[in-house]
Amino acid sequence: MAELIDGKAIAAELRGQITTDVEELISVGVTPGLAVVLVGEDPASRVYVSMKEKACAAAGIYSVEHKLPAETDQSQLLELIDSLNNDEKIDGILVQLPLPEHIDEAQVLETISPAKDVDGFHPYNVGRLMTGHPVFQPCTPYGIMKMLEHTGVELKGKEVVIVGRSNIVGKPVALMCLAEHATVTICHSRTVDLPQKVAAADIVIAAVGRPEMIKGDWIKKGAIVIDVGVNRVGEKKLVGDVDFAAASVNAAAITPVPGGVGPMTITMLLYNTLLGAKRRAGESS
Ligand code: NDP
């Protein structure tokens, strides 16, 4: 049976280190600050924003929430971002996605200063990741890399198969694995014979958003499985993109859902905010 890659435990360990580093920074007069911008009333977004704020408070990071009504127009939002770009107490700016339809998401993300882009979504930071010199690494892929590091697996020469090619998970995690010298295959909805592609993987990263679509018998014996998917089934149950029980038979290690990648994503947001503050304090490049 597969070993569990316990995202909660890994996140807790990292958050402990982050909290210590935050205390040290505060002692030299620099309090890391995160601004979270929420436009509209999307219930899931409200939950995510409140989780991020709680995590900041627990780590000693100053956070400020800007809740704007759904009818906020583009220029008001850009003005707010501009003022946060110039706010010395703020090291990270996070605009919670999705934005209402009348807002041009790309323009909003491009207005965030790349030096405060703790989500790593600004095209400048995307380009820096592409060239192997990231300023901020996007939180979910970064969390995945930390989990892989925790398993002790060396990525060099390994076959990594990523299912999903989104800008926030699939593509950036592919670049990060490539930077670690893995051989990377990115699969998507038009991929032919997905089971055969997955079966070749030493490491499978599933970021699709379809409940348990990756079947247990696709998994090569001894593979590591990272399940990014979060799918609600019925009223309360959450499942990943991988059939966890069946995949656990062949996998050497696997992440659960919930309790896997999810806790790592917020942790890496704290980590990036801390990094921004260290740069402000002149302690990091
Ligand atoms: P997107 O919807 O942006 O992308 C999904 C990807 O899956 C697309 O590339 C799509 O292909 C591909 N896909 C869809 N159907 C199939 C199929 N049948 N076979 C192969 N590939 C398929 O999703 P995200 O990347 O934003 O998120 C993926 C999942 O991860 C979601 O469940 C989301 O909730 C979760 N998530 C979890 C996070 C966490 O912190 N735990 C953070 C971010 C996401 P195509 O491009 O061809 O359409």
Image (tube, grey):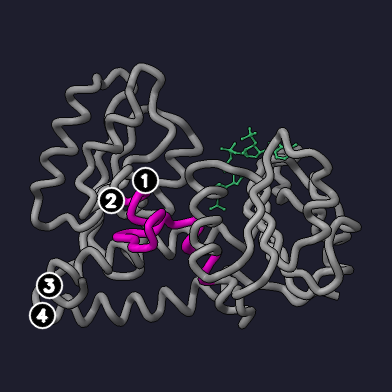
Residue at 67% in and 70% down = 158
Q: Which tag is nearer the camera, tag 2 or tag 4? A: 2
Q: Is residue 131 above or below residue 283?
A: above
On residue 117, the disc is 2
Query: Is the magenta region chiefly helix, strand or loop?
Result: helix
Q: How far apart, in angstroms, are the residues tagged by discs 1 and 3?
A: 24 Å
Per the image, the residue denoted by label 4 is 28
Residue at 68% in and 48% down = 163
Comparing 130 with 26, the one in front is: 130
In the rendered structure, which amino acid carries the disc numbered 1?
A: Phe
Q: How far apart, in angstroms, are the residues tagged by discs 2 and 1?
A: 7 Å
* Figure quadrant, ligand 1: top right
Q: How far apart, in angstroms, are the residues tagged by discs 2 and 4?
A: 24 Å
| Marks 2 & 1, CB-CB < 8 Å contact | yes
Per the image, the residue denoted by label 1 is 121
Sequence-wise, the earlier of marks 4 and 1 is: 4
Q: Which tag is nearer the camera, tag 4 or tag 1? A: 1
Q: Secondary structure at mark 4?
A: loop
Per the image, the residue denoted by label 3 is 281
Quarter of the figure that contains the C terminus: bottom left
Q: How far apart, in angstroms, are the residues tagged by discs 4 and 3?
A: 8 Å
Comparing 276 with 35, the one in front is: 276
- The magenta span reads 125-146
Q: Secondary structure at mark 2?
A: loop
Comparing 229 with 47, the one in front is: 229
Q: Quadrant of residue 220?
A: bottom right
Sequence-wise, the earlier of marks 3 and 2 is: 2
**Where's residue 57, x and y in %?**
31, 63
